Image: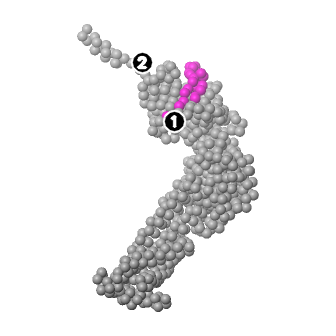
Amino acid sequence: MRLFIPVLFACLLATPSFAAPTPAELLASSDRARGAAKNLKGLSWRSEVVSVESGKEESSVTYTVKVLGNDALAQVTQPARQKGELVLFNDRTLWYFKPGLKKPVNISPRQKLVGQAANGDIASTQYARDYDALEAGEDTVNGQKAWKLELKAKARNVTYDKIRYWISKSNQVALKAEFLTLAGVPFKVAEFKYANSITIAGTKFPFVSEMKIHDANNAENKTSITYKNPKEEAHAAGLFNVNSLMK
Amino acid sequence: MMSFWRLAFRNLGRNRKRNFATGSAMAFGFAGILLLTAYAYRAKNYLRVYTVYVVHTGHLIVFPKNGFEKFAFEPEKFSLSAAEQEKILGLLKADPAVERFERQIHGQGLVGNGCVSLPFMARGYEPEVDHALREHPQVKLWMPKFRYLLQGRGLEAYPPELGALLLSRGLSSALGKTRLHDQFPESAPVSLPDCEHPKEQAAKDSNVQLLSGAWAGNLSAVDGEVVGLFTTGVQETDSSAIMGSVELLQKLFSTDRVAQIAVWLKNPDTLEASRAKLAAQLGEDFEVLRWNEERLSPYYVGTVNFLDTLIRAGGLVLSTIIALSVLNSATMTVLERSQEVGMYRSMGFRRRHIRQLYVQESLLLSFFSLLCGGILGIVAIRLINAADILYHPPGVAGGLYLILVLPAGQAIGAGTFILLLALLATLFAVSTRLRQTPADLLGGTLR
């Protein structure tokens, strides 16, 4: 009996577990629900970006988004005057092109695309690739229990320097993000919904259906990205070659 | 009267060393004041011409109400619509005091060579007005050695559909766009990007892409052809500035609006009257600013204020040295000659006669000293101008040539001021001594 309690304690410590996932695992899982197509033949969906400034709708742009590995191509389908405009993501390098332009333009993922959305927000999310994550405790977001992570950019050419990220404990998808300045002050806040799903290798995964971004200092300035019809779809690698944009 | 002048002239020879020292102080002091005045006069005019003509500020500038402050944040809202432009241009065309006017637009974005993109600040002008301003007599007069168009021809030499633009030299170097449109055959194709060798790739054509947020909120991009290189004259903008036509930037920003309309007057002396008249004609929905308002031309106003302070301080120091030299010399002379003064008084000369004698001595000394100082100053100015001295004030790209221009009116004014100063110092020194009685003066008791 004298040995029972220490042995029991040692056994509990040594038990392989039901331990919490690591921050890197959480990011990989949440990225998949936001369009990362690692180890897939490709993904595609349609995004509608609606921007509201001071409570008034400013613009609405629809994209078809195709993703293969670390590359993505977002092409405008509406409105008519912007039809054919492209944003190509080659790893962390972004290119903008529109019909009639002689060469593509190298752009920054941080640059404003529409309203509160930056170029880097429009395609798939690669936070597991682009950020170092540290666990920062637990929290509740809209009634859901979540892990809170502090993300710090691994490189300068990513969309945000720092992110405070809440990932659901129940299905490991991102619920909320605060995008921070270098000084750690939030300047944009995003919230996510997952009414879509996608089936990969016979397994059904939740997929983002809406990302709402608002200005941290003025909630009337907001942009919503609605994701429709996500599906696994094969894409040719040549589609993501920058030179192919001009042909 | 003539005998007093002769006497005064002869008296100057009685203590040559002291008078030479006093005269030298006045001559060098005056020459110094002339050099300072010439530097400030030229610098102010250089800055005026740079601000009004080279950077297209104009004498007057018309904004929509609050447009000057808020255009950068909401360009679509705080810019001039096509109808507003038509109204303003109609008024300006009918005004005989107006020399020329120009619609202007500006904004920022990224300029790419097919491989790399860099930030730019672009200003859109009307090519014909830009050409006229480059050739303006004021620019030729005050900035004869300044060439803001470093290579190539101006925008006016190319058809609007080409998308001609000028790159600042720093931006051209950073993008590798060192060859111009005219250096390629007419039918040269635009080459596909080979970003393994971005500099070599960039030099294969003169084509660039401008990308910016359209005023409606979406991204927008246009092709441009580099037809020339220019310098802004200011280091902080010489690596990011682009100049294009109003039409090119309107296409980039997807708008038919402009930010402002600049106005050049035939006679800049009517500045405030012309501003008030135009403001009254346009009404409360517009603002008309003068070019020399601090919020519009902070660099000009700040530099001119600094120059004025410098001139005042330098002038005060030199004037004090001259006044003290004359006062010291006159006091010594009067002291030495107090018995002589006593003798004049006992012979029946009145105080005013003695005072007149000393004043005439001082006038002669000052006149010759100022003459020598003037000649010295003019020779120094000519030598400096002939030396082609290039100096590098902080923030000025490429440096500035040290050129001095002496304004005749101000030079005469400075000379007159020094002359008066010398006379006052002499009168002060003499008056103290003349209060003594002839007996005291003859006895030399108070020496």
Q: Position of residue B310 (x, y in %)?
A: 47, 64
Which mark identifies residue A97?
Answer: none
**Which residue shows up at 71% across the image and 50% down it?**
B85
**Residue topped by disc 2:** A18
Q: Is residue A190 magenta?
A: yes
Amino acid type, residue under disc 1 in the picture? Phe
Chain designation of label 2? A
Q: Secondary structure at mark 2?
A: loop
Quadrant (top left, top right, bottom left, bottom right) of the C terminus of chain B: bottom left
Is B124 on the left or on the right of A6, as rendered?
right
As measured in the structure, the alpha-carbon distance from the residue carrying label 2 to the one carrying label 1 is 36 Å
Q: Secondary structure at mark 1?
A: strand
Which span is picked out in magenta? A186-212
**In the figure, residue A235 lies in which quadrant?**
top right
Which mark identifies residue A187?
Answer: 1
Q: Residues within 10 Å of mark 1 (few under 14, many from 20)?
A: some
Does residue B150 appear anywhere in the picture? no
**Which residue shows up at 58% across the image and 28% down it?**
A211
Q: Earlier in the sequence, mark 2 or mark 1?
A: 2
Q: Position of residue B374 (x, y in %)?
A: 50, 78
> What type of secondary structure mainly makes up the magenta span?
strand
Q: Are marks 2 and 1 on the same chain?
A: yes
Q: Is residue B101 magenta?
A: no
Q: Position of residue B392 (x, y in %)?
A: 49, 63
Amino acid type, residue under disc 2 in the picture? Phe
Look at the numbered discs 2 and 1 and tell me whether their residues touch, using CB distance below 8 Å: no
Is B443 on the left or on the right of A208, as rendered?
left
Does residue B350 appear anywhere in the picture? yes
Is B231 on the left or on the right of B10, as rendered?
right
Q: Residues within 10 Å of mark 2 (few under 14, many from 20)?
A: few
